[in-house]
Image (cartoon, grey):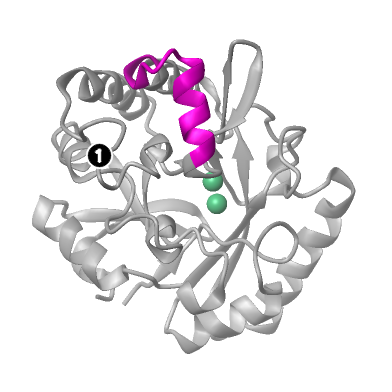
Amino acid sequence: MIKQNLHTHSVYCDGKDTIDQMAQTAIQKGFTVLGFSGHGPCRFDDVAMKEKDLASYRKEILEAKEKYKDQIQIYVGIEEDIWQRVASRDFYDYVIGSKHFVKVRDQVKNVDYSPAMTDEIVSLYGGDFLAYAKDYYEDIKRIAQFEEIDIVGHLDLLMKFNEEEQYCSFTDPAYLGYAQECIDVLVQAGKIFEINTGAIARGYRKYPYPHQRLLEYIFQKGGKIILNSDCHDRNMLDCHYPESMKLIRDLGFTSMMVLTPEGFKEAPIDQFSL
Ligand SMILES: [Zn+2]
Ligand SMILES: [Zn+2]
């Protein structure tokens, strides 16, 4: 049975645990595939890895890969912010592409940061959340052209602090229109959509990204998916996995993507552990 997480942070960026601690926990929790995806260098992001640390990041992961090779497959990945793409794709087994920032009225703001910052972003848009959503999804569409990116990270991150629909209904037709247009372009480009439980682990959301309505759309369009925990704390490595697997099955997905030594492959859903 396959149990996989390809979205894992460590002390190299804003994670709590070392590469080795995370690998050990993954083995204890029955994972068969673990990929590390530290935040790629990004001038807007204080916690992102620095260019000078990338060689030791990779080296340490490769050491864990060798040390635990009989127990788990370990891969070297990166979470690239789409505003600062990786210098060399050859350095990594895979790349997650994520949008963490918006630029509005010449100010750069962090989408991921806090309810107060989301308030600030929306007020810079003159209180128009939909205008924010339009720009946000328009920018993510560019991932279709970014050949290095395999996986689209937390597609609807802008809804992180919207659990009670404070800013926008998850089913607002205009909102869904922007998101669906973006999904169309990314499906066409063959990108993999991540079902990401990270905001549940941090207590902001009850359900993974993307919202169920968007997942239904991804399913209808034949999009490829993967389940990731966006882990910053090894205790949360499989946070909400059983519930997410149930959701994925209930939506009708019959396969998910898995990373192998030969690259990404599609595997039937019943090969994934619950
Ligand atoms: Zn991210
Ligand atoms: Zn992340």
Residue in the foreground of this view, choosing between 11 and 192: 11
At a point 9% along the width and 57% down the height, the residue shown is 250
Instruction: Residue 184 in the image: state x and y as whole percent.
Output: 28, 23
Q: Which picture quadrant has residue 167?
A: top left
**For the magenta stretch, what is the residue range?**
116-131
Q: 226 left or right of 165?
A: right
Which quadrant does the C terminus fall into?
bottom left
How many circles with numbers are drawn on the protein?
Answer: 1
In the rendered image, residue 127 lying in the magenta stretch gets the answer yes
Q: Residues within 10 Å of mark 1 (few under 14, many from 20)?
A: few
Which quadrant does the N terminus fall into?
bottom left
Position of residue 230 relative to residue 135, above or below, is below
At a point 77% along the width and 33% down the height, the residue shown is 43
The secondary structure type at the circle numbered 1 is loop
Residue bearing mark 1: 165
Q: Which picture quadrant has residue 187?
A: top left
Q: Can residue 194 be seen from the camera position used here?
A: yes
Residue in the foreground of this view, choosing between 259 and 149: 149
What kind of residue is marked 1? Glu
Q: Main secondary structure of the magenta part?
A: helix
Instruction: Residue 235 in the image: state x and y as whole percent.
Output: 50, 79
Position of residue 121 relative to residue 30, above or below, is above
